[in-house]
Image (cartoon, grey):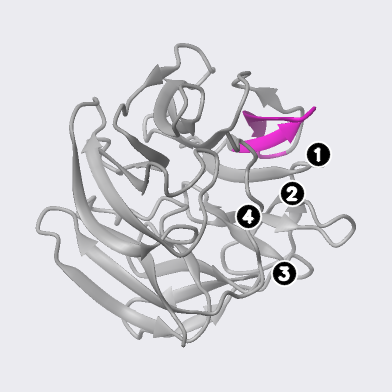
């Protein structure tokens, strides 16, 4: 079983990227823009006006009204992958950036309007996924001593705290809007499945049980629903989330239970790595892809 976290590539793939939204209830898809290069992982801003995405190592803001993109200046932090998260007040952006010194991913924070970055995690590799709703902590996947687990660290810097300690990959940690729980995905039962634990790491509870590999759970702003991306069993190793696969985006109640597939698409890596719920919990933003000839 492959349980090593794949390092997202910041160079381009030979694809056309299609930035879309979908109505979670009706399933209606809307194409916002098509790009002749790789873009990934849209975050929806709290005011509903912009989507934040990464492309070729930089972070961009896409204006939903004008359909135009502008780069967010971040100085030397220019090898960002698809792990980026907005602060609860939307004043700052935290990113995973592959540092020039050793090429490993570390977490940095800089103003959403652009500005100088601050290093948060000196240890590497660290892959960002969540920001606590009170603004105090970041949650991330990190490899320490040959094992990938979930950690948290104060946003202002400090000592990281290990949340999980199991063989294999634990990944994708994201806080619930009330800050009481962290949702994540883990291979601890064989396939990659969605889990939930208390914010202090206690009481890990498996939330999906089907014969798929389920990744990156994102809780809706109203706390009612969780969306995640699913790979077919046998199509990928449980610990791998590659690009260019036929995948499903699924939604389930935050209390658990049956899932519902809302869209099937060609994608995977880059499609739904970050929380892309609209502020009203009615839509999702995502990226689908087409291979170039």
Front-most of residues 102 and 233: 233
Instruction: For marks 2 and 3, give the CA distance.
Output: 12 Å
Q: How packed is label 1: few (under 14 Cα within 10 Å), some, or many (20 or more)?
A: some
State the extent of the magenta-drawn residues as a range: 140-156
Identify residue for label 2.
106
Instruction: For marks 2 and 4, give the CA distance.
Output: 8 Å
Instruction: For marks 2 and 1, give the CA distance.
Output: 7 Å
Marked residue nearer the N-terminal end (1 or 3): 3
Identify residue for label 1.
123
The reply to whether the C-beta atoms of the residues labelled 2 and 4 are less than 8 Å apart is: no
The reply to whether the C-beta atoms of the residues labelled 2 and 1 are less than 8 Å apart is: yes
Q: How packed is label 3: few (under 14 Cα within 10 Å), some, or many (20 or more)?
A: some
**What is the count of numbered marks?**
4
Taking the magenta stretch, the answer to whether it contains residue 146 is: yes
Marked residue nearer the N-terminal end (2 or 1): 2
Q: How packed is label 2: few (under 14 Cα within 10 Å), some, or many (20 or more)?
A: many
Farthest residue, direction top: 203
Farthest residue, direction right: 101
Would you say the magenta stretch is mainly helix, strand or loop? Answer: strand
Identify residue for label 4.
95
Indicate the quadrant where residue 290 lies: bottom left
Q: Which mark is residue 233?
A: none
The reply to whether the C-beta atoms of the residues labelled 1 and 3 are less than 8 Å apart is: no
Taking the magenta stretch, the answer to whether it contains residue 3 is: no
| Percent x, y of residue 102 | 87, 55
The reply to whether the C-beta atoms of the residues labelled 3 and 4 are less than 8 Å apart is: no
Q: Residue visible at 31% across and 26% down?
A: 209
Front-most of residues 122 and 82: 82
Instruction: For marks 3 and 4, give the CA distance.
Output: 10 Å
């Amino acid at each position: 079983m492959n349980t090593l976290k794949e390092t997202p590539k910041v160079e381009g793939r030979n694809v056309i990227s299609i930035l879309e939204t979908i109505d979670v209830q009706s399933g209606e898809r809307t194409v916002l823009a098509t790009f002749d290069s790789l873009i990934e992982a849209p975050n929806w801003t709290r005011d509903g006006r912009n989507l934040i995405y990464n492309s070729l190592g930089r972070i961009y803001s896409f204006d939903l009204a004008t359909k135009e993109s502008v780069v967010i200046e971040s100085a030397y932090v220019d090898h960002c992958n698809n792990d980026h998260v907005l602060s609860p007040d939307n004043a700052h952006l935290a990113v995973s950036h592959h540092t020039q010194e050793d090429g490993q991913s570390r977490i940095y924070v800089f103003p959403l309007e652009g500005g100088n970055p601050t290093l948060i995690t000196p240890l590497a590799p660290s892959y960002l996924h969540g920001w606590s709703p009170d603004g105090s902590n970041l949650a991330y996947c990190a490899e320490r001593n040959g094992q990938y687990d979930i950690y948290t660290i104060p946003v202002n810097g400090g000592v990281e705290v290990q949340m999980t300690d199991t063989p294999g990959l634990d990944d994708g940690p994201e806080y619930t809007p009330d800050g009481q729980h962290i949702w994540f995905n883990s291979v601890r039962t064989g396939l990659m499945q969605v889990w939930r634990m208390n914010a202090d790491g206690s009481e890990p509870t498996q939330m999906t049980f089907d014969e798929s590999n389920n990744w990156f759970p994102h809780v809706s702003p109203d706390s009612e629903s969780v969306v995640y991306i699913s790979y077919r069993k046998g199509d990928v190793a449980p610990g791998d989330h590659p690009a260019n696969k036929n995948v499903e985006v699924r939604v389930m109640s935050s209390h658990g239970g049956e899932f519902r597939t809302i869209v099937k698409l060609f994608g995977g890596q880059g499609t739904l790595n970050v929380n892309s719920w609209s502020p009203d919990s009615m839509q999702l933003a995502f990226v689908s892809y087409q291979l170039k000839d």
